[in-house]
Amino acid sequence: MYQPNQFRLDDPGALKQAIDQAPFATLITQSEKGELNADHLPLLFEAADGGSSPGTLRGHIARANPLASGRVDCQTLDCQALAIFHGPQAYITPSWYPAKREHGKVVPTWNYQVVHAHCQLRLIDDPDWLKALVTELTNRFERDRETPWAVNDAPAGFIDRMCRAIIGIELTIERLEGKRKASQHKPMEERESIQQGLRDESGYDDADSLCLSGID
């Protein structure tokens, strides 16, 4: 990923937060024939307890997915994968820039936040592991609801059948790199104008409009 220094996002806490806020990832792998494949799935991040890895990502795919039927060796950690987490993004019109009124020498841009996780991938076909994973995924995405749905709200036999239709994915992270291109290198007056435009014209909430305007 092209990384100008002013846009580099490398603080471990900020990277974890970015993943947690945008957990639906694009997972890139390569087949034995050299073909690139992209799968789309939510991934949960777990920070490492010491060691050289920044942590792991966990999720699941359908058992019918070609990724689960021969593209990788389920028993070893020798398959390279790239998980991409897309954060907030927005078109930035030059109409918001104070410089447009002053001299007109302005052009549009696109602001965004993204994290790349370079990983070693393995598949996990273990009923207990999968049951724990889907429970954790459910709890994560139901937690803000007034009346959260829980896995044990469904019949146990039904959940067991559903789990037999999926395969677990565990990604050991080798390297994390993040990028926040958000006009943070621009004068504060311009950043404030972008933040106002994102909020008032484009409908972004305060958190995303502040993130995308480069205002910390």
Image: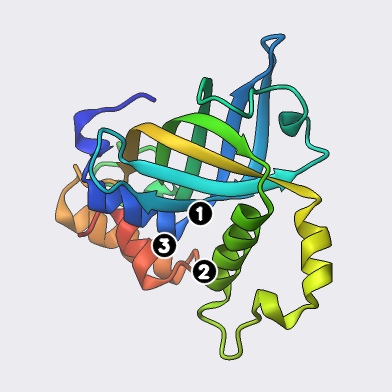
Q: Could you tell me the amino acid type at mark 3?
A: Leu
Q: Where is mark 3, residue-wise?
A: 198
Foreground residue, 71 or 208? Answer: 71
Residue sitting at 52 percent across and 20 percent down?
A: 78
- Which tag, 2 or 3, sits closer to the chain's start? 2
Q: Quadrant of residue 11?
A: top left
- Check if mark 2's residue and mark 1's residue have beta carbons within 8 Å: yes
Gap between marks 2 and 3 measured at Cα:
28 Å
Labelled disc at residue 140: 2
In whole angstroms, how far apart are the C-alphas of marks 1 and 3?
Answer: 23 Å
Cβ atoms at labels 1 and 3 below 8 Å apart: no
Few, some or many residues within 10 Å of mark 2 (<14, 14–19, 20+): few
Q: Few, some or many C-alpha atoms within 10 Å of disc 1 (few <14, some 14-19, many ≥20)?
A: some
Disc 1 residue type? Pro
The circle drawn on residue 206 is none
| Mark 2 vs mark 1: in front | 2
Q: Where is residue 94 shown, x and y percent of the image?
A: 38, 47
- Label 2 and label 1: CA atoms lie apart by 10 Å
Residue 28 spot, x, y in % from top left: 59, 29
Could you say where residue 91 lies in the image, as x and y percent from the top left?
47, 48
**Along the polypeptide, which appears first: circle 1 or circle 3?**
1
> Going by the image, does 170 lie left or right of 98?
right
Quarter occupied by the C terminus:
bottom left
In the picture, the disc for residue 23 is 1
Q: In the image, what residue occupies the spot 24% across and 61% down? A: 192
Q: In this view of the protein, can residue 96 be seen by the observer?
A: no
Residue 125 placement: quadrant: top right
Tell me what residue is drawn at x 61 percent, y 25 percent: 29
- Does residue 155 appear to the left or right of 134 in the view shown? right
Q: Secondary structure at mark 3?
A: helix
